[in-house]
Image (spheres, helix red, strand yellow):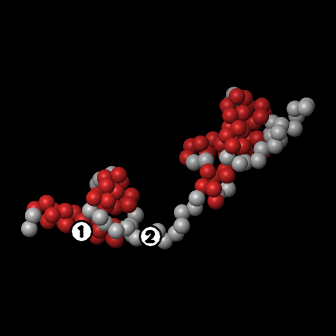
Amino acid sequence: MDLRKYLRDIEKKIITDKLAELNYVVTAVARDLEITRTALWMKIARLNIEMPEPKYKAIQAEDRDPIFRISGLNNIKHNAALEALRNNNWNRTWAARELGLSLRTMRKYVAHLRSMGVEIPDNPHINK
């Protein structure tokens, strides 16, 4: 038997067993094998390891409430801006002061939230 094929078979068995043991959670398997997720995905592809179909359908961004499309730190910032706007009767100047932001930054947050589909009323204090 060729040594490379033998080592490839052993590597495939180790990865397959570890995937099954950890319910095919790639992050946990990579951590346990002390390799990166990218390296693990490359090995899975190279070794032709079959991955099961996901049990649950991933929620697509368009299926979510628009505010939840903003992720991570931006989510926290935009949620804080939205809450300050609500607390200050949608007045951007007051909301910006409450958060210690410039009015320009608050306007950018409002524009971004609107682009994500969040309904933000016009400032009721501006005479049009």
Q: Residues within 10 Å of mark 2 (few under 14, many from 20)?
A: few
**Residue located 36% across and 54% down the image:** 37
The answer to whether residue 78 is left or right of residue 54 is right
Q: Is residue 125 visible?
A: yes
The foreground one among 90 and 60 is 60
Residue 19 location in percent, x, y?
Answer: 33, 67
The total number of labels drawn is 2
Residue 11 location in percent, x, y?
Answer: 22, 63
Three-letter residue code for mark 2: Glu
Question: Judging from the image, what secondary structure is the residue with disc 2 in?
Answer: loop
For disc 1, the marked residue is: 13
In the rendered image, the residue lying farthest to the right is 127
Q: Residues within 10 Å of mark 1 (few under 14, many from 20)?
A: some
> Which of the two marks, 2 or 1, is nearer to us in this view?
2
Asked if 110 appears above or below 102 in the picture, the reply is below
Within the image, what quadrant is residue 21 found in?
bottom left
Residue 118 location in percent, x, y?
Answer: 72, 48
The answer to whether residue 8 is left or right of residue 92 is left
The foreground one among 48 and 89 is 48
Cα separation, mark 2 vs mark 1, equals 20 Å
Three-letter residue code for mark 1: Lys
Which of marks 1 and 2 precedes in the sequence? 1
**Residue located 67% across and 50% down the image:** 67
Residue 113 location in percent, x, y?
Answer: 69, 43
Asked if 24 appears above or below 81 in the picture, the reply is below
The answer to whether residue 70 is left or right of residue 22 is right
What's the mark number on residue 53? Answer: 2
